[in-house]
Image (cartoon, grey):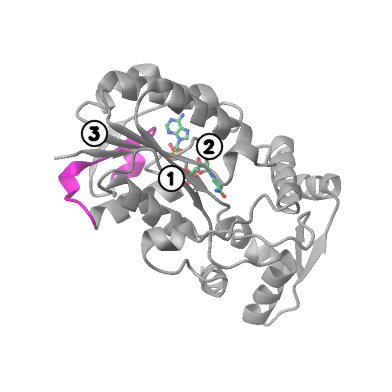
């Protein structure tokens, strides 16, 4: 029987992937790979230590693993060597499939973040291990994560102009990952995944206003001013720069895709923006 392993299993996306896998295959076929195993005690599956920065942890954790979901690592700038270490270890362990969470339209994406994903896709191709690419768009939670501040201050800041974006919730991307991981023959697939619904930042702000009953408007800023505003609220410079650059790229269409591959894959519409906003306001 195939054994499925998931990296980053203690993160937001990884937890949801494990839950989706549990709905599809017996729990003893799933291995949660975790940098901090104690965080995975409630996942309901076997947890193995797996730290991208500690190469000695990788081979034993991959013993008996057939299909591996490599959820992209979270430290921007360190990810290429981290992903390479995982790919090398998976190859040595005889893993038959790596599914990797890349970024929407990776080959020509304007997102600064895309470079590490392009390099990882190249490393996968180089490795000879069969692989599938989940080119995930933005998380809706990237917007709704700061909904409290938007309501409090009556403003959504950004640099995306009036461009439309098609994000999807982590739950939608996690469902897709579980479908692909357990599919009959997913090797070779490249999936551009995004939400069904397109909206502008002004439309997002209007939805927040409608549901909260408060005045909330979108204020568009030049990329530099948005970066400075993010730094003023306490984000580290590189993170603020990355977010502002991503938003400016979104302004040029980098976070838009109307192919609807995600809803086809999961067999249902992606989560409507109204539902995501309602969930965030209730949290
Ligand atoms: N598409 C988007 O909009 C978007 C937005 C944000 C992030 N992302 C990407 O998607 C990934 C998953 O998102 P998320 O929201 O689930 O992120 P998250 O909650 O930050 O989870 C990241 C996971 O990676 C693990 N990890 C980090 N460094 C590691 C290392 N050196 N060795 C082993 N595991 C390590 C973390 O382990 P610990 O629990 O020990 O910290 C955690 O389980 C992110 O890592 C990032 O690459 C995409």
Element under label 1? Answer: loop
The residue located at (45%, 26%) in the rendering is 125
Element under label 2? Answer: loop
The reply to whether the C-beta atoms of the residues labelled 3 and 2 are less than 8 Å apart is no
3 or 2: tag closer to the N-terminus? 3
Element under label 3? Answer: loop
In the rendering, which numbered label is found on residue 11?
1
Tag nearer the camera, 1 or 3: 3
Residue 31 magenta: yes
In the rendering, which numbered label is found on residue 89?
none
Which residue is identified by label 2? 74
Q: Disc 3 to disc 2, how far (Cα)?
A: 24 Å
The residue located at (47%, 56%) in the rendering is 170
Q: Give the residues in magenta.
A: 24-41
Q: Where is 87 relative to 145, above or below?
A: above
2 or 1: tag closer to the N-terminus? 1
Q: Disc 2 to disc 1, how far (Cα)?
A: 10 Å
Which residue is identified by label 3? 66
Q: Residues within 10 Å of mark 2 (few under 14, many from 20)?
A: few
The residue located at (53%, 37%) in the rendering is 74
| Residue 53 seen in render | no
**Label 1 C-beta lies within 8 Å of the nearest ligand 1 atom:** yes
**Label 2 C-beta lies within 8 Å of the nearest ligand 1 atom:** yes
Where does residue 93 sit, x and y in percent of width and height? Answer: 26, 22
Q: Disc 1 to disc 3, how far (Cα)?
A: 22 Å
Of residues 114 and 228, the one nearer the viewer is 114
1 or 3: tag closer to the N-terminus? 1
Query: Which quadrant of the structure image shows residue 28?
Result: top left
User: Is 255 left, or right, of 225 in this rendering?
Assistant: left
Q: Residues within 10 Å of mark 3 (few under 14, many from 20)?
A: some
């Amino acid at each position: 029987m195939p054994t499925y392993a998931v990296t980053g299993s203690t993160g937001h996306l990884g937890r949801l992937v494990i839950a989706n896998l549990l709905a599809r295959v017996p729990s003893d076929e799933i291995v949660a790979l975790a940098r901090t195993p104690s965080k995975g005690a409630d996942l309901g599956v076997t947890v193995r230590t797996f730290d991208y920065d500690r190469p000695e942890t990788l081979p034993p954790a991959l013993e008996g693993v057939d299909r591996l979901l490599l959820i992209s690592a979270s430290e921007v700038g360190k990810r290429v060597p981290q992903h390479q270490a995982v790919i090398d270890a998976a190859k040595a362990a005889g893993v038959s499939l790596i599914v990797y969470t890349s970024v929407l339209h990776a080959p020509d994406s304007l997102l600064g973040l895309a470079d590490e994903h392009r390099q990882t896709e190249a490393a996968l191709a180089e490795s000879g291990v069969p692989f599938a690419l989940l080119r995930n768009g933005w998380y809706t939670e990237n917007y709704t994560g700061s909904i409290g501040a938007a309501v409090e201050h009556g403003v959504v800041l950004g640099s995306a102009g009036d461009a439309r974006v098609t994000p999807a919730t982590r739950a939608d991307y996690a469902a897709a990952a579980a479908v692909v991981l357990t599919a009959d023959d997913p090797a070779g697939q490249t999936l551009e995944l995004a939400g069904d619904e397109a909206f502008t930042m002004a439309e997002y702000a209007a939805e927040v206003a409608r549901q909260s009953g408060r005045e909330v408007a979108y204020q568009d800023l030049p990329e530099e001013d948005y970066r400075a505003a993010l730094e003023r609220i306490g984000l580290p410079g590189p993170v603020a720069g990355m977010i502002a650059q991503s938003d400016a790229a979104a302004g040029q269409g980098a976070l838009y895709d109307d192919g609807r591959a995600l809803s086809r894959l999961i067999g249902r519409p992606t989560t409507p923006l109204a539902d995501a906003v309602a969930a965030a306001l209730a949290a």
